[in-house]
Amino acid sequence: MFRLFQADGKHRLVYFFTEENAVIASQPTSNRSRQSRRRRLRAVLNMILITSSAASFTTGCQSVGSHVAKATRTPAPVHATPSDEIPSSFQGVVDAPVVTVAFDDKVDVGVDEKGLSENSAANARQEQDSDEKADADDAGSLADVMALESPRQAAAYDVQPFSMSNDYYFSEQPADQTDGLTLEAIESIALANNPTIAELVATTQKAAGYKAQVGLRANPSIGYQATQLADRGTDQHTIFISQTIITADKLALNRNVLNEALRAQLMQLEAQKYRITTDIRLAFYDALAAQNRVNLIQDFQSVADTGVDLAEQIKEAQEGSQLDVVQAKVQQNEIRLALRQAQVQLDATWRELSALAGNPNLTPMPLKGTLPNAEAELDWPSVASTMIASSPEVQAAQARINQARANICRQEVQPIPNLDVQFAAGLDNGTDNGLINLQIGAPIPVFNKNQGNICAARSEYARASRELDRIQNSIKARLAAVSRAYDSSLIAVEQYTSDILPNAEEGLKLAEFAYKAGETSFVQVLIARRTYFDTNLQYIVSQQQLAQARARVDGFVLTGALDAVVDRSGDDSLRGLTLSQQ
């Protein structure tokens, strides 16, 4: 030990070696080892406590991220593309603002494009507030993900049939088939069995899955780090947890884009239902007309057979000639040929009908239904306007425009960097103290400002707008062709009903009466019969054309029940773009 002494007027510091010092200096090495182990045990306990406290780090990071997103996102770099910045070729495009139906039930569908960025930001902030609850629950079933939550928007996108006769378009229960197969029954069979319905349901579920995937937050990382292990006594041990904080509401904007893709798939599914029911109606009326022709020819065949017997009897009574017999047999053979051809046509139309219904092995049975005797005249410009406003084909195109516009908003915020935060805690054996490290980093958008994707998104918006114009013009062109068939067949049915059929029937009666009175030849009777027969066949054709034209109008002039399904459900590339920051 040291002591201070004064001698000769000077202060001296003298060290005394005492027994106490000797005991301390001579402590065995095992005691020092035990003290080192106790320090290490305290360090392990401290690390356990630090690890348990770090479990809530992700939640804290997200709270910081919410604050950073609000502070980072400024109106200058983040804005919707105004209408005056779109090239002049974009003028006249139907304004279809971005809406997020599955995530916000307060979106105003009528907002203009200038307020698009503000609406997107509000929707995204609401998304961040609900992220905590969304992550606690899973994405849920695909049916829940596909649900359109906003009642107003669900009503706005509801597909209304053109006429009241379409109420049974989506019936799933077949009607009673005891007296024959009805149109409602075959439509139900088709909607249940047609493979394109199952394909579009699958693509819709894919779109719902992608929508859920692109909105998920990044997973945190946790690990252990040790440094200076080779230098004994100065090694450091830490446990760290890191999290990527997504800024600028990118996840909510991702959902906006994929939500419109999901909406477009739902509209395509509705359009496919109309395609199936329209084709089913066309084939049904073909089969029904063929069935009526078979019945008519069978009835007239008995008249032709009776005519041959009558001609032979007249010849045997020497009141007629062999020419009358030959003419009667010619007409009989023509009727038999027509019956065979009508039966072949009926069989072929039945096979087509069963194939469209998705059940090629459907047992043939009589069809129950009637062909129209009259229809109302239609105001075709009004029909075209109503059809364009309600067609699911048009609504799908409008959803694609919404998707393209939402993608513009998404790509414009991509240059705003995410934050990479890392928190570490541990022990420094060199100082026998704990240590805490915090690291925050972000990429600097110097070279890559996502300018290429922004340009591509704007070009896609222009293409989607022109696609809407094409579909609208296509509907008008198809409706014009249908209107020609509808009006001409309507005139024919009315003319046959009011004039031609009554006159043909009266001519046949007069010819038979004159022949019995000996005032005309049997050939005139055969001609009158042939005229009456042909007139009734043409009347069935006119009825068939009128019924099919009406079916096309009721089905929004959509056909192609078995056409290939185009998969436009999208992908999850936006999630990779969100996390890569490159």
Image (spheres, helix red, strand yellow):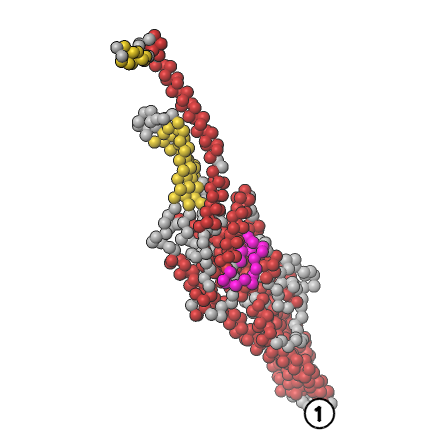
Which residue corresponds to the image point at 64% horizontal and 83% vertical from the top-left? 531
Tell me the magenta residue range: 99-115
Which residue corresponds to the image point at 55% horizontal and 52% vertical from the top-left? 103
- Is residue 361 shown in magenta? no
Say which of 460 and 405 sits in front: 405
Say which of 13 and 552 sits in front: 13
Direction left: furthest residue: 8
Q: Position of residue 471 (x, y in %)?
A: 50, 68
> Based on the displayed image, in which of its 4 quarters is residue 525 positioned?
bottom right
Q: Which residue is mark 1?
A: 519
476 left or right of 178 in image: left
Q: Is residue 237 above or below residue 156?
A: above
What amino acid type should be assigned to the residue bearing mark 1?
Glu
Q: Is residue 300 above or below residue 447?
A: below
- Is residue 106 shown in magenta? yes
24 left or right of 351 in image: left
